[in-house]
Image (cartoon, helix red, strand yellow):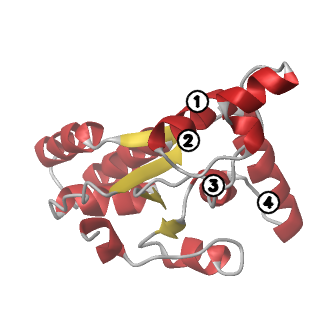
Amino acid sequence: SGLFRSRMLISSGCPKRASETRAGRRKRGRGWPTHRLTRSLYCSPVARYVIDAPTLLDLVANHVDVHPSNQLVAPNRIRSEALSLLLAAVNQGDITEGLALQQHERLTEIKMRLLGDRVSRRTAWRIAREHGWETIFDAEYLAVCTLQADALITIDRELALKAEGIVPLAPLDALSSD
């Protein structure tokens, strides 16, 4: 929310607009600004990356640790989608149920910021309509990236092709480096 980001900006020591200072707030007689701050004003050393369910499962299967200077962001449904992929792998005989449940435990331990608010859903709708897609599923990842992240990281070639020209892409190894 704008209030949270504004307070984070003010407490982070980043450059502020006059309207974002306590003096500016008192002078104008308004509360904290609620507008969405742009990334250029949000001076966090943390890089935010959107990942999809296949990429999440790849991180879990290969025991990849996300560097502390990186934050994962995804749509709310990512864990359910990952669990569905694990179920399909078990049903096809690719992995055992025990391994699937272990991977499910590990994926729930990965810290991610999950989004499913009205703005991200509406942005996903707009992206899907603009590109003539049948569903908003892939558009949800691109919407979250557009609104809250620096780049998309995916091992899914189809999603990567859809994302070209809409959001920046980053390689998988970006997650383990600063």
- Secondary structure category for the residue under label 3: loop
Identify the residue position indicated by label 4 in the image.
128
State the residue in front, 6 or 20.
20
State the residue in front, 117 or 86.
117
From the viewer's perspective, is residue 78 above or below residue 51? above
The quadrant of the picture occupied by the N terminus is top right
What residue type is disc 2 on? Leu
From the viewer's perspective, is residue 42 above or below residue 174? above
**Is any part of residue 35 visible from this angle?**
yes
Identify the residue position indicated by label 1 in the image.
4
> Given contact means CB atoms under 8 Å apart, are the residues at marks 3 and 2 in contact?
yes
Mark 2 or mark 4: which is in front? 2
Q: Is residue 51 left or right of residue 67?
A: right
Cα distance between the residues tagged 3 and 1: 14 Å
Cα distance between the residues tagged 2 and 1: 9 Å
What residue type is disc 1 on? Phe
- Secondary structure category for the residue under label 1: helix
What residue type is disc 4 on? Ala
- Secondary structure category for the residue under label 2: helix
> Given contact means CB atoms under 8 Å apart, are the residues at marks 4 and 1 in contact?
no
> Given contact means CB atoms under 8 Å apart, are the residues at marks 2 and 1 in contact?
no
Residue 57: which quarter of the image? bottom left
Check disc 4: other Cα within 10 Å, few if <14, some if 14-19, many if 20+: many
Q: Residue at x 26, y 50 (%)?
A: 90
Check disc 3: other Cα within 10 Å, few if <14, some if 14-19, many if 20+: few
- The mark nearer the N terminus, 4 or 1, is 1
> Given contact means CB atoms under 8 Å apart, are the residues at marks 3 and 4 in contact?
no
Identify the residue position indicated by label 3 in the image.
41
- The mark nearer the N terminus, 3 or 2, is 2
Residue 84: which quarter of the image? top left
